[in-house]
Image (cartoon, helix red, strand yellow):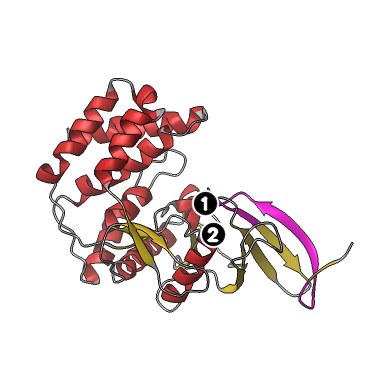
Amino acid sequence: MELYAGAEAVQSYELLQTGRANTNYLIATSQRQLVLRLHVHDATSCAKERALHDLLEDSVPLAPLLCSCESAQLLGHPFSVLAFVSGTTLERALQGGAEIRLETAAHSLGDTLARLTQFRFEAFGDLVAEPGASKLKVAPWSAADFYRQTLFESPASARLGPLRDRVWHLVQTSAERFPDAWPPHLTHGDFNPTNLLVDDAGEVSAVLDWEFAHAGTIWADLGNLLRSRPECPLPPYFVPALLESLSDLGLNLPENWNALRLLTDLSSACEFLSSPDDRPQTHAAALAQVRHTLKALE
């Protein structure tokens, strides 16, 4: 059976191993490569990502959005079709070396993060968009409620064991010990090396997978980006280059920035540990992250 994308014959397709919540297929047509993104986890994320694309397309490197369908009638799920963006994930670049390119990448990522902080919101929370609407709205959340539920009412409690009470105490005392005056702004929410494409010169060519974007702070994205990953360690010049780029753009981080990014990223580790299914490698990495954060901040 021959498939068509408009007037373009589909020559092949394959499942991409990217995206934690949605399903992506790389489609090769007779003229180009496309990415079909099925919004299987949250049907509302299609409208959200379309609204984000409209907001950011002139400011942040994105995969061009060609069309989206917020109804599930055609494919069983809402879907988006994006142009395929060539480049190397930051993960692969870190594994392969090329010092000049990685220093350039750090500067380019600093520029991208600074641009995200320019989009402000009235409260911290999830971003939502109504079907067909272009404006994003905030569904407010409470960090205290998240930690209370995650630490005491989810499988994370048993997996953390004696670490649970130490995490709770750290969270309870964090506002006084690590003051943070940053207002809520656009946060990618999954700003890790697998979602960041760089070109041969090291410039960011696209930031992928916006399903976890929210109104938060830069600490979440810095925490994710700078999280310890033994499989792709950051070279020693990476963080100084990143901070230099932020400073050059007028984004002067407070002295306690490293504590704030560790503390904010702690919520991700706790969320991983709250999963109902057993994922030994993921949970082991999350526990290692919790121990590292407690050692650094207690």
Where 232 falls versus 51 (above or below)?
A: above
Res 245 → quadrant? bottom left
Q: Disc 2 on helix, strand or loop?
A: strand
Q: Nearer the viewer, residue 202 or 125?
A: 125
Going by the numbered disc 1, the residue's amino acid type is: Arg
Residue 229 appears in view: yes
Residue drawn at the location 34% of the way across and 62% of the way down: 138
Residue beneath disc 1: 92
Q: Disc 1 on helix, strand or loop?
A: helix
Classify 10 Å Cα crowding around label 1: few (below 14), some (14-19), many (20 and above): some
Where 220 falls versus 160 (above or below)?
A: below
Residue drawn at the location 61% of the way across and 49% of the way down: 17
Question: How many numbered dots are placed on residues in this image?
Answer: 2
Q: Nearer the viewer, residue 225 or 188?
A: 188
Left or right: 40 in relation to 198: right
Residue 217: image location, x then y, percent: 27, 57
Q: Is residue 7 magenta?
A: yes
Magenta span: 5-24
**How far is mark 1 from mark 2, CA to CA?**
6 Å
Residue 235 appears in view: no
Where 54 falls versus 14 (above or below)?
A: below
Q: Is residue 19 magenta?
A: yes
Left or right: 290 in relation to 275: left
Residue beneath disc 2: 88
Residue 298: image location, x then y, percent: 17, 32
Asked whether the residues under the numbered discs 1 and 2 touch, taking CB atoms below 8 Å apart as contact, a structural biologist would say: yes
Q: Nearer the viewer, residue 183 or 130?
A: 130
Classify 10 Å Cα crowding around label 2: few (below 14), some (14-19), many (20 and above): many
